[in-house]
Image (cartoon, rainbow, N blue to C red):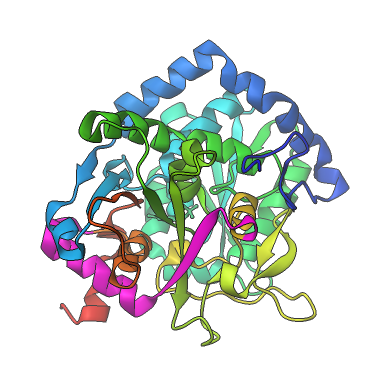
Amino acid sequence: MNYNVNEKGYYGDFGGAYIPEMLYPNVEELRQNYISVMQEPEFQEEFKELLKEYVGRPTPLYYAKRFSEKYGTKVYLKREDLCHTGAHKVNNTIGQILMAKRLGKNRIIAETGAGQHGVATATVCALMGLECIVYMGAIDIKRQAPNVARMKMLGATVISAESGSKTLKDATNEAIRDWINNPTNTHYIIGSVVGPHPYPDMVARFQSVISEEVKKQLLEKEGRENPDYVVACVGGGSNAAGLFYHYLDKPEVGIIAVEAAGKGIHSGESAATSALGKEGIIHGSKTLLMQTDDGQITEPYSISAGLDYPGVGPMHAHLFRSGRGEFISVTDADAMQAGLDLCKLEGIIPAIESSHALAIFEDRKFKKDDVIVVNLSGRGDKDLNTYIEYFDLA
Ligand SMILES: *Cc1c(COP(=O)(O)O)cnc(C)c1O
């Protein structure tokens, strides 16, 4: 079976480009050009150079000795938390800003929920001196004031989406409207492996630097490129897609995707898409998403803003449906505890998203000699207030 995208833009039954007709020229321009642009030697050179000198890649593959001892197996952490801006998202925004420049676009738009993708986009726009407009729901602007301030410091214009529930979905609608109205000079930077084809594939390719590095690093440390398992949290699924990418067609490597169960899968407050989702269309692609019987998208919930999304990208829907991926959901409580454990065991404060991936070791048992790579997608600085409130640390 093929686990990567096919020439029509599908992963098995999932993916495609379900977009309003007025958006077709923009998406089609990108579809026709993205692969040839990415394959240009000058593009590759500039991308690699920025990842090295600006982002700080390669990120370490760190053997977590005390964490491994606790769980009786061998765990390596891929340290995406050490990327400039504190998470993996910048790998993708660097790639897309270079793509935008090659396509002659001088105006960048993005949508953001918690603000992390908005900050990563504003960062690379400052780096390249391009105009940056970030759409954000009015409620999210209130909830995520520090990230709004960061975007403004970086020179971005933040536009409040005042319609509907005033959150991510409404910000996305505004961004799409903007793109339709500005087809020639504007590129829309999507922040995860979601959206119409070619976005999921393009973002996965930019993030695939993660598993490209893991292969080399593991060969050095373990004498083999392939671990027994790769583990990552899934919001839209970009950090997971980056870690899984070069292992999709290696059946000897187990793929484990970790979703947010929030207050419990059946609590009504969850983001466990594989457990609860049904086939539907969101943000221009056919995938699994949480919806009511009459097809209304259900409001997701997770204590971690990055996993608080009602769907997963089409690659992950296919990994789930085909059985290639093992999907585990982790509650807020278990993720928070796992995050605190990592602080005490390794001196690393993880993002709450990443803590979900760390939490599986309580219940999911591995063999003593198994080599497991967990993607530490981001650092916990942005989550300090949540940790403080949750553990009453003030
Ligand atoms: C945004 C974010 C995620 C979730 O996004 P994916 O596209 O699923 O990777 C996970 N971890 C961190 C630290 C994030 O900022």
User: x%, y% of residue 298?
Assistant: 65, 77
Task: Determine whether, in the image, residue 119 is placed left or right of residue 362.
Answer: right
Quarter of the figure with the N terminus = top right
Residue at 80 percent of width and 80 percent of height = 294
- State whether residue 104 appears in this view: no
Q: Quadrant of residue 283?
A: bottom right
Task: Determine whether, in the image, residue 311 is placed left or right of residue 387.
Answer: right
Residue at 28 percent of width and 44 percent of height = 79
| Residue 346, magenta (yes or no) | yes
Residue at 28 percent of width and 71 percent of height = 362
115 up-or-down from 105: above or below: below
Residue at 75 percent of width and 53 percent of height = 13
User: x%, y% of residue 218?
Assistant: 28, 35
User: x%, y% of residue 205?
Assistant: 54, 34
Task: Determine whether, in the image, residue 382 is placed left or right of residue 170.
Answer: left
Q: Quadrant of ligand 1?
A: bottom left
100 up-or-down from 357: above or below: above
Q: Which residues are magenta?
A: 321-349
The residue closer to the viewer here, 270 or 115, is 270
User: Among all residues in the image, which is located at the extreme top?
Assistant: 41
| Residue 135, magenta (yes or no) | no
- State whether residue 392 appears in this view: yes
Tally of numbered discs: 0
Quarter of the figure with the C terminus = bottom left
